[in-house]
């Protein structure tokens, strides 16, 4: 009888564990800090339990680590977004992302990424951007997407899902700012019934264990 109780408890546990709710979690990141940072500093932006870490690099190497540089948040009218601390353009009054430097976003803290939309802030009449994917810190990686205008990328995840980092850089003869990032993920949460059944199964195993020890 005791063995039957233990077997039943194990069966209930096996039935209960796979059941879970799939929850969709969304977060919007507006890059409003830091006001300026030293080379090598990284900043993590958090919202709704999701974290995105940003860092800056000077250079365009795709095979070796580039030189760390500082980040800078622009809050002037018409030029709002994240740029690089050593790229100030007096005519635009903004610290921008140029063609030879980039901002790297670490997506490793985003579980089960579904969609990612990046919004840019143009600082000149002629502006463009490029997005790369990389698995190495400081490396520009592989060219994923590019455009000659200010636009959102609703399908970024389809190109970037296999990469740890997403790198943002300006297009040819352009400068830009990283303005906003929207992401959505899917997380699994145990159903109440699952939690209850798991608890009952564990309790059954405990009772069965005690009875087996007494019989011995």
Image (tube, rainbow, N blue to C red):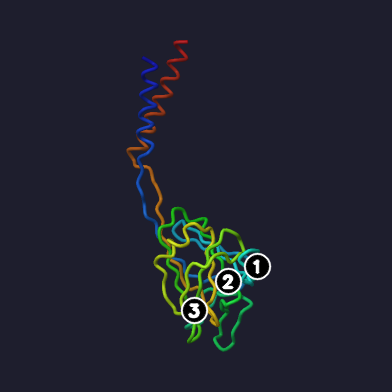
Residue at point 47%, 70% (across, down): 145
Residue 149 at x, y = what percent? Answer: 44, 79
Residue 10 at x, y = what percent? Answer: 39, 27
Q: Quadrant of residue 115?
A: bottom left
Query: Relative to 155, is 213 above or below?
Result: above
Residue at point 56%, 89% (across, down): 91
Q: Secondary structure at mark 3?
A: loop
User: In this image, 156 relative to 15: left or right?
Assistant: right
Residue 171 at x, y = what percent? Answer: 52, 77
Report the disc number at residue 93: none
**Mark 2 Cα shell of 10 Å, populated few (<14), some (14-19), many (≥20):** many
Query: Relative to 43, is 24 above or below?
Result: above
Q: Determine which residue is flagged by label 2.
A: 102
Residue 72 at x, y = what percent? Answer: 58, 74
* N-term-proximal mark, 3 vs 2: 2
Q: Are marks 3 and 2 in contact (CB under 8 Å)?
A: no
Q: Are marks 2 and 1 in contact (CB under 8 Å)?
A: yes
Q: Determine which residue is flagged by label 1.
A: 66
* N-term-proximal mark, 3 vs 1: 1
* N-term-proximal mark, 2 vs 1: 1
Report the disc number at residue 128: 3
Q: Secondary structure at mark 1?
A: loop
Viewer-proximal residue among 111 and 169: 169
């Amino acid at each position: 009888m005791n063995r039957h109780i233990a077997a039943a408890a194990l069966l209930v546990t096996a039935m209960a564990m796979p059941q879970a709710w799939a929850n969709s979690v969304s977060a919007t990141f507006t890059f409003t800090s830091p006001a300026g940072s030293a080379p090598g500093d990284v900043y993590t932006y958090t919202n709704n339990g999701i974290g995105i870490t940003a860092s800056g690099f000077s250079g365009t190497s795709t095979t070796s680590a580039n030189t760390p540089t500082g980040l800078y948040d622009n809050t002037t009218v018409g030029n709002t977004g994240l740029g690089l601390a050593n790229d100030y353009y007096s005519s635009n009054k903004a610290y921008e992302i140029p063609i030879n430097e980039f901002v790297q976003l670490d997506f490793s803290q985003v579980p089960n990424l579904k969609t990612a939309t990046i919004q840019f802030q143009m600082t000149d009449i002629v502006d463009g951007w490029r997005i790369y994917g990389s698995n190495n810190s400081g490396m520009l990686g592989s060219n994923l997407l590019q455009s000659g205008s200010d636009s959102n990328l609703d399908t970024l995840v389809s190109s970037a899902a296999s990469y740890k980092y997403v790198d943002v850089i300006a297009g040819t003869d352009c400068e830009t700012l990283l303005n906003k990032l929207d992401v959505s993920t899917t997380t699994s949460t145990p159903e109440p019934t699952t939690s209850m059944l798991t608890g009952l199964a564990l309790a059954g195993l405990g009772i069965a264990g005690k009875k087996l020890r007494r019989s011995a």
